[in-house]
């Protein structure tokens, strides 16, 4: 039987491999290695049982192949047959062989031990009391533990890198954290190839030269990556600042190369892309940012909204009020991400509501994970009124569990009555409750939700009994029957003025 010329690359699953030593350490399995190499470099990706005389066509690579030797002719088999059998496993990329004792063989055939030793295939003796299914289950348990450890490591690294990016010296801090997390060296190269900052242990002249050479490969190629191995160190380079063509490069030298290290380095590359964006601009503020800053300063110094609005752009604007659908308090990162999704950087995080000023030409759309209330398009002079519209729309959206509610202006009965007369009537009608904003807001919300106690409670973030008490107090102060549809209509007319 011929031997394949080269072993195929194992099709590794999306989980870390398991060191063979960890499987041997399981006392419940009582496995014993009797041939082949040992050490942390010997790993397995899965376990598979087969009694085929030629398992090559059925292996993916990286397996611990389990067999009871049913396919072995006679009692011992020939040396040549064992050599061919082991060579086919090695050619298929098999990581190790487990031989089960009893009921077919009382001991592992010496010829199989010799073949595995000669061809560098780890051979395990599986005792009679250990089922192959138990070995496979142990492999998957170890893989799950390794995956959990890897995810925890990546999560902790992400948190530490994010914290480093917020320090007064963000670039050196991020490099220090990255070097510590991968156990190596991290270097930031500038567009001209010069070394701007570095952290971690020195790796020698050969590694330093390798990092510089690898950086030149990806310089000017945003989001490009390249890898190499020099003097036993694994090198990687990441082009920074996608879309800017900045030429900044992050280069990393680490003692190992595994998916979690790559993930950690990628997070650092994203953070450094944001941090080096200001370096690329020479620490100068863009024209758009300068206009926004001017608008803010002028408003703080007393300018009216319609005077500063041209600095933000022309036309009308929507005011959007948003609240997380999960009813958790939003943070600054989530608020900024919402503004980006809506197409506006003008974001305000106040209490548990995010307010966004959106140009009218960008019609706000529902956003996953958020409940939105949207005002009509309004000119700057009407922004305070639009803010109130968005607040009422959000309250209605939360009460009705709708992802987005828009305030709509349309012709109504109020348009048939002169404005001054309508306002005078409203003041007179609502005078008994006018001194209590809580009563007015509760009455308005309750009427807008067709007298629903539960939805009004949700919209106002109060208990339904509080709603009942307030509505009862409104009825008493107004001396009217709020179950009467004519009364409700007249009150709604007044509350809209």
Image (cartoon, rainbow, N blue to C red):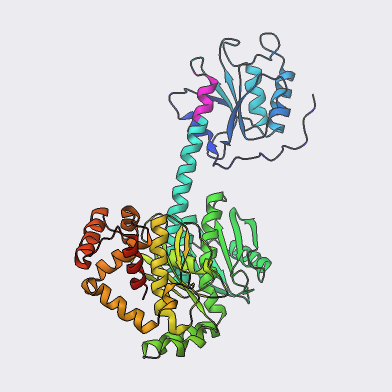
Q: What secondary structure is the stretch in magenta mostly built from?
A: helix
Q: Quadrant of residue 301?
A: bottom left
Q: Position of residue 8 (x, y in %)?
A: 71, 38
Instruction: Give the residue drawn at x 21%, y 72%.
Output: 432
Q: Can residue 286 be spotted in the picture?
A: no
Q: Can residue 494 be spotted in the picture?
A: yes
Instruction: Give the residue drawn at x 57%, y 51%.
Output: 257
From which residue to which does the magenta span run? Answer: 130-138
**Magenta run includes residue 23:** no
In the foreground, 182 or 138: 138
In the image: residue 234, left or right of residue 387: right
In the image: residue 53, left or right of residue 255: right
Instruction: Give the residue drawn at x 37%, y 87%.
Output: 300
In the image: residue 54, left or right of residue 24: right
When the figure is inspected, residue 450 is found, relative to residue 283, above or below; the finding is above
In the foreground, 21 or 159: 159
Q: Position of residue 225 (x, y in %)?
A: 64, 61
In the foreground, 87 or 387: 387
Q: Quadrant of residue 75?
A: top right
When the figure is inspected, residue 129 is found, relative to residue 259, above or below; the finding is above
In the image: residue 100, left or right of residue 25: right
Which image quarter holds the C terminus? bottom left
**Magenta run includes residue 137:** yes
Q: Position of residue 232 (x, y in %)?
A: 59, 53
Which image quarter holds the N terminus? top right
């Amino acid at each position: 039987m011929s031997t394949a010329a080269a072993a195929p690359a194992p099709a590794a699953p999306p989980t870390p491999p398991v060191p063979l030593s960890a499987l041997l350490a399981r006392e419940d399995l009582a496995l014993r290695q009797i041939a082949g190499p040992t050490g942390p470099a010997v790993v397995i990706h899965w376990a598979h049982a087969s009694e085929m005389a030629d398992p090559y066509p059925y292996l993916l690579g990286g397996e611990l192949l389990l067999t009871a030797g049913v396919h072995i002719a006679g009692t011992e088999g020939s040396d040549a047959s064992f050599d061919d059998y082991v060579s086919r496993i090695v050619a298929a990329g098999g990581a190790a062989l487990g031989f089960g004792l009893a009921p077919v063989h009382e001991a592992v055939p010496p010829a199989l031990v010799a073949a595995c030793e000669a061809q560098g295939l780890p051979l395990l003796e599986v005792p009679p009391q250990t089922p192959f299914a138990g070995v496979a289950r142990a492999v998957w348990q170890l893989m799950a533990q390794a995956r959990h450890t890897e995810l925890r490591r990546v999560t902790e690294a992400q948190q530490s890198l994010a914290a480093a990016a917020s320090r007064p010296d963000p670039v050196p801090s991020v490099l220090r954290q990255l070097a510590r997390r991968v156990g190596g060296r991290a270097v930031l190269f500038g567009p001209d190839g010069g070394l701007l900052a570095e952290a971690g242990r020195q790796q020698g002249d050969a590694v330093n030269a390798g990092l510089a050479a690898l950086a030149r490969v990806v310089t000017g190629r945003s989001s490009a990556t390249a890898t190499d191995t020099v003097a036993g160190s694994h090198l990687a380079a990441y082009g920074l600042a996608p879309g800017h063509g900045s030429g900044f490069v992050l280069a990393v030298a680490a003692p190992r190369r595994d998916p979690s290290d790559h993930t950690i380095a990628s997070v650092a590359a994203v953070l450094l892309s944001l941090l080096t964006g200001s370096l690329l601009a020479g620490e100068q503020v863009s024209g758009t940012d300068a206009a926004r800053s001017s608008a803010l300063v002028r408003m703080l110094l007393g300018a009216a909204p319609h005077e500063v609005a041209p600095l933000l752009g022309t036309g009308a604007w929507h005011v959007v009020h948003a609240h997380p659908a999960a009813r958790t308090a939003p943070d600054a990162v989530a608020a900024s991400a919402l503004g980006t999704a809506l197409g506006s950087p003008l974001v305000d995080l106040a209490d548990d509501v995010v307010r966004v000023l959106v140009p009218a030409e960008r019609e706000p759309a529902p956003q996953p994970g958020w409940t939105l209330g949207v005002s009509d398009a309004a000119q700057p002079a009407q922004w305070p009124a639009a803010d109130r519209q968005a607040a009422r729309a959000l309250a209605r959206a939360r009460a009705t569990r709708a992802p987005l509610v828009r305030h709509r202006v349309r012709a109504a009965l109020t348009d048939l009555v002169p404005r001054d007369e309508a306002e005078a009537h409203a003041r007179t009608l609502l005078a008994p409750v006018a001194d209590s904003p809580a009563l007015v807001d509760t009455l308005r919300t309750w009427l807008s939700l067709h007298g629903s106690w539960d939805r009004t409670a949700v919209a106002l973030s109060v208990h339904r009994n509080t709603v009942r008490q307030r509505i009862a107090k409104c009825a008493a102060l107004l001396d009217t029957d709020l179950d009467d549809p004519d009364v409700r209509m007249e009150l709604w007319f007044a509350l809209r003025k």
